[in-house]
Amino acid sequence: MEIPYVVNPRKDTGLFNSKIAIWLFLASEVMLFGGLFSGYVFLRIGADYPWPERTLPVLPGLINTFILIASSVTVVFAWAALKMRKWRQFQIFMGITVACALIFMVFKGVEYGVKFKHQALRMNDFTMVEGHIGYVKAKGGDDHADDHADDHGEEHGDDHAADYARDVHGEKIEANQHVFAAESVAFNLARYHKPWAEDLIAEAAREGVEVKLAETLDFNAGEGGEEPVFEAGTVLSMDLLDDLADAYADNLTRNATWRKRYLRKAWDIKWEDVEENNLLGEASFAADFPKALELESDERKKAYTRWKAGMRARMAQDVTIDEVKLSSGSKPVTIDDESYASRELPAPGSAKFTCSKPLVLRQKSHDVITDYKADNSTISLRDGTSLAGAYKPSPMDFHDVDGIDFQHLAMDAEKRNLDPEITIENSWLVKNNPVVADLWTMHKDAIAQLEQNLIDHYGYRKGKDGKPLEDAAGNPVAKRVPTEKDRYRMGWQEIAYYMDLLDKHEGEGVPKIDLPKDANAAPKVTMTPKEHFMGPDYGTRSFPHLTIPRSEVLLDAKFTPKWNSYYAIYFTITGLHGLHVIGGAIVLAYYLFFGRSMYLSNPEWLANRVEVGGLFWHFVDLVWIFAFPIFYLM
Amino acid sequence: MADSPEEIKKSIKTYLLVGAILFAGTVATVLVATVPALDIGGHGFDHWDMWLGLAIATTKASFVAAVFMHLNHEKAWVYWLFGMGLFFGAAMVFLIFLAKGDPIHYDRFEDGGVSAAVMSE
């Protein structure tokens, strides 16, 4: 069958089929991305934490913008070449377009990869620390990676695979773990995670710890039926756990079936009572609601219907699994003269095991859901397993700290009418880490100079009358002042700048900062081209190493949606945009590699298809034109 | 729209010019955001920088839509379809400002219900 209007436009719309289809689709896409961008605005103006503005490295985003713009030009050229029946030119321009899409995705992948490796931490006092965490060594006792090279070994292609401990999936284990000496372990029989249970059993065998069932679990409730009985003292094994889980699931199902029957029976008893005594009849309605007799016929009908619905709801409350309240009193619910209670089988949801001596377990931070500070004698894992015992020191060892951020702390201090700077000086990090204390002293010094430079350069604000404006305290108001980010955040460039000074003036106390008398001078190192793209060069720059005790950790995460809503919306919008790039590239590549026969038989049809594919591609470019400044520059 | 080979040939220059404008616009966006001497408004990022950045982006987007997507000479149907999409897309952003403009803030519920109690009196 021949499809009309694939080449020539319809007379009424003036458009060929696929063109009207693509514009319909693009209209829906505008609304999709419009919704997501409005989500961004909503999250940003409603954020209860300092929004991370201008936080992404600009160069990769800029290069990607250039790539997309170039591909937008080449896709138009490819279409124009087809219109002019120049197949070779079409191939070249379309080939460049598809190559641009691939390069875009590679850069995006690199950008995402950096985020997935970068560690962030929010402390109890809202100090933020950003940096990198080492990996657990395969041998040795309390084995936090302590060598600078370990941290970035993988990035430098220097990955000594055998040196690191691996988890069940063969992944290296980060030195960000909760180390816990468990005296007892309670498994959630509905959802314990088998690989973790296997790890625990293997660890117990390695440490020579016997893990035994703490108390007898009798799934018959002592009546000697067919259900299994698990004796106290049985040694933990995967078979035992599986049997326990099966017994639990069986009893749960059986109990549920009986519950259903008993409740059905109870309701039948209640309904007999209702029918016998005509409890839902009009007479009962009139007795319950005498004023109804005064209502008009229609009104009374409506009121009666409402009353019946209400009565049914009330009656449901009279029905329980053991007993039904009737108009003549209560009646027990039985089936074959037996109550539900006598049939119910025990279904304990967890099985507790005790350890012959404390079993030291290391849990990835990601797998622990307990709030450490709430009770440091228990720990809960994501699969519902609960360990009781005592925490061992489980600090987070940061290597190459490339961001120390007091913005949230300062915001919180201001909310409580406290002086932010004094609060920062009393923060755990500044009080307990001499290097951070030095960095903060230098940073304060630098910001004071920046503030003065801005005043010297731009002066003070003046009112309409030409007189200097004053704030509430009577001080003149400067035209330009350092931002909150300038004041309270030390990014990697600032940290590298201060660390460099500290190294140069070692043993001479905190070095004095001497910023040039220039409004644009900032306490930052100059980035190398590679650093513009990949972030700091940890091999040549100096960054502090910090150890944060677990008790000070409020939240730790990679730079992923877990960290904050900025990264959530960043990954959502750029991820969806990336999917569009991939989808568009596949379609354009199809025209490139499989379009030849159509070109020979009906070149105009192919030109129309390319035009439609190109329209989608331009839309992908349009989204990026907004995404780039919004995420990278604002 | 340019449809005959001759007209398309003539349009090539326009496409190149728009490509150049887009590159220049991108460079301008980055410069005003990263070079302190070109920083408008206060020091660092503020709403002036936001409006400038969005204005440049909108200009760039208009060029892409008008020239590359041929919206400068399209059929009425396309304007209707795309226009409706834009309208409803913008409406979603507007909804947020409705929420922010609501005089009854959710903060009210964060003071232990004191305000709510006062209001009900």
Image (spheres, rainbow, N blue to C red):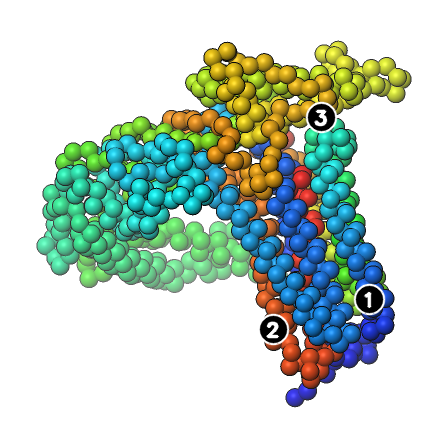
Would you say residue B114 is visible in this rendering? no
Task: Look at 46% across and 26% down and name the residue there.
Answer: A544
Q: Which mark is residue A42?
A: none
Q: Which mark is residue B74?
A: 1
Front-most of A89 and A625?
A: A89
For label 1, the SS is loop
Front-most of A502 and A309?
A: A502
Q: Quadrant of the C terminus of chain A?
A: top right
Tag 3 subunit: A
For disc 3, the marked residue is A520
Tag 1 subunit: B
On whether disc 1 and disc 2 are found on a single subunit, the reply is no
Crowdedness of circle 3 by 10 Å Cα count: few (<14), some, many (20+)?
A: some
Would you say residue A481 is visible in this rendering? yes
Query: Mark 1 or mark 2, which is nearer to you?
Result: 2
For disc 2, the marked residue is A593
Task: Look at 48% across and 30% down and name the residue there.
Answer: A401
Does A84 appear above or below A485?
below
For label 3, the SS is loop
Quadrant of the rendered structure where residue B84 is?
Answer: bottom right
Does A628 appear above or below A278?
above
Question: Which amino acid, by three-letter code, is at mark 2?
Answer: Phe
For label 2, the SS is helix
Q: Position of residue A332 (x, y in %)?
A: 26, 53
Question: Which amino acid, by three-letter code, is at mark 3?
Answer: Asn
Task: Look at 51% across and 30% down and name the residue there.
Answer: A541
Q: Quadrant of the N terminus of chain A?
A: bottom right
Query: Mark 3 or mark 1, which is nearer to you?
Result: 3
